[in-house]
Image (spheres, grey):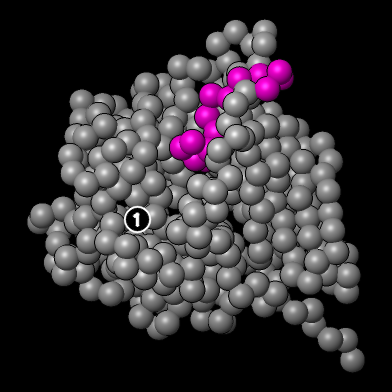
């Protein structure tokens, strides 16, 4: 009798970007190592680094007139059971940090951890999926590094480029800017449902389609519109990454839950218990620290706003006069779910609250 292979997600207690270190812990550790590690060396000048931290490092090199290198890395545990699709998702997620800075990827190398007793045919599919994503981004995959690991992990180190006048930064927004989100939320919920055997085929299909969609064209629209503020929404959910944006910009933020686009069926999955531990932790820490003020929002809505995304969309700070141009541009390149989900406002730096007329509203548009 042949034993069926264990589904990849069973190796992953916190799948995808839900396996990230807690936001508060990471902030504390980075604070302790910032001093003495920020000056540019002889090889270049650091334009964006750890102070404040952003989605990727940006380094100016001698002779690169008007352009900089973008350097980032990202890897994660399985979020779906199909090895090829997991490879595509992990690679797309890693490439996203370059797009979140307004850049384009040039070269990538694989980062791989693999159990010694796990089928090598699955490994080959993971690498094929990753290569497909990198090739689709117009970049080169040129090697990498691997280790034996009890839990499979895969991702990329990526080098890209960006024009000096096109860099998107977490702190680039200003009070009054509208917040445009380009992808639907709920990816962490679906990943949890997959691990628990509670996800339907439609849930998986919709989530994979979203997670394998590059943020390339969304970044191009943002750069063409002259935007300066943005990030991508990944393991700390919408509120976690919005908190980072608002804190870096010295402003507060307000979210309109009724406008936030969701993958179909995720509210019901949360109510069935399919919320990632990472999402629950982000919400719990945000409430304890006082920077998230949810008003009368129901618990399910709060969890969805904190849902840990893998290969999520861009969150862009858009001046009011440019909203129609940006939304029109995004929809013209296929970002049909892009929508205004809130705004940056004067207030306590980093605080995320709920817009006045949405304080008792739930997330309604599950099929947007």
Q: Nearer the viewer, residue 34 or 271?
A: 34
Where does the C terminus fall, quadrant-wise? bottom left
Tell whether 60 sits left or right of 7: left
Residue at image position (82%, 44%) is 144
Tell whether 120 sits left or right of 295: right
Residue 164 in the image: above or below residue 343: above
| Residue 113 visible | yes
Residue at image position (20%, 69%) is 297
Q: What is the quadrant of residue 64 in the picture?
A: top right
Which residues are drawn in magenta? 41-55
Q: Nearer the viewer, residue 219 or 63?
A: 63
**Residue 48 belongs to magenta span:** yes
Query: Residue 51, image x and y in percent?
Result: 49, 36
Tell whether 19 sits left or right of 140: left
Residue located beneath label 1 in the image: 239
| Residue 206 visible | no
Query: Residue 328, image x and y in percent?
Result: 32, 32
């Amino acid at each position: 009798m042949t034993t069926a292979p264990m589904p990849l997600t069973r190796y992953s207690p916190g799948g995808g970007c839900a396996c990230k270190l807690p936001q508060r812990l990471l902030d504390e550790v980075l604070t302790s190592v910032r001093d003495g590690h920020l000056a540019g060396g002889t090889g270049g000048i650091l334009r964006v680094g750890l102070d404040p931290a952003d989605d990727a490092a940006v380094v100016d090199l001698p002779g690169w007139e008007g352009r900089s290198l973008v350097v980032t890395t990202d890897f994660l545990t399985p979020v779906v059971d199909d090895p090829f699709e997991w490879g595509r998702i992990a690679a797309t997620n890693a490439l996203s940090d370059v797009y979140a800075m307004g850049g384009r990827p040039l070269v990538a190398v694989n980062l791989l951890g693999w159990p010694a007793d796990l089928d090598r045919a699955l490994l080959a599919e993971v690498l094929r999926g990753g290569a497909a994503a990198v090739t689709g981004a117009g970049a080169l995959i040129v090697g990498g590094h691997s280790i034996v690991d009890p839990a499979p992990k895969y991702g990329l180190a990526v080098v890209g480029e960006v024009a000096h006048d096109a860099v998107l930064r977490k702190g680039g927004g200003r009070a009054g800017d509208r917040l445009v989100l380009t992808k639907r939320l709920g990816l962490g919920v679906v990943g949890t449902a997959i691990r628990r055997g509670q996800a339907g085929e439609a849930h998986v299909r919709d989530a994979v389609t979203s997670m394998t969609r590059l943020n390339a064209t969304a970044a191009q629209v943002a750069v063409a519109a002259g935007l300066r503020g943005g990030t991508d929404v990944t393991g700390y959910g919408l509120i976690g990454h919005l908190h980072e944006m608002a804190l870096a910009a010295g402003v507060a933020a307000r979210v309109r839950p009724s406008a936030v686009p969701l993958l179909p069926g995720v509210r019901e999955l949360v109510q069935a218990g399919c919320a990632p531990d990472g999402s629950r932790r982000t919400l719990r820490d945000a409430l304890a620290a006082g920077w998230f003020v949810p008003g009368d929002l129901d618990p399910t809505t709060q969890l969805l706003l904190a849902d840990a995304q893998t290969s999520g969309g861009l969150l862009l700070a858009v001046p009011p006069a440019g909203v129609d141009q940006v939304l029109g541009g995004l929809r013209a390149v296929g970002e049909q779910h892009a929508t205004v989900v809130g705004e940056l406002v004067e207030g306590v730096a980093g605080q995320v609250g709920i817009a006045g007329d949405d304080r008792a509203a739930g997330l309604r548009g599950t099929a947007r």
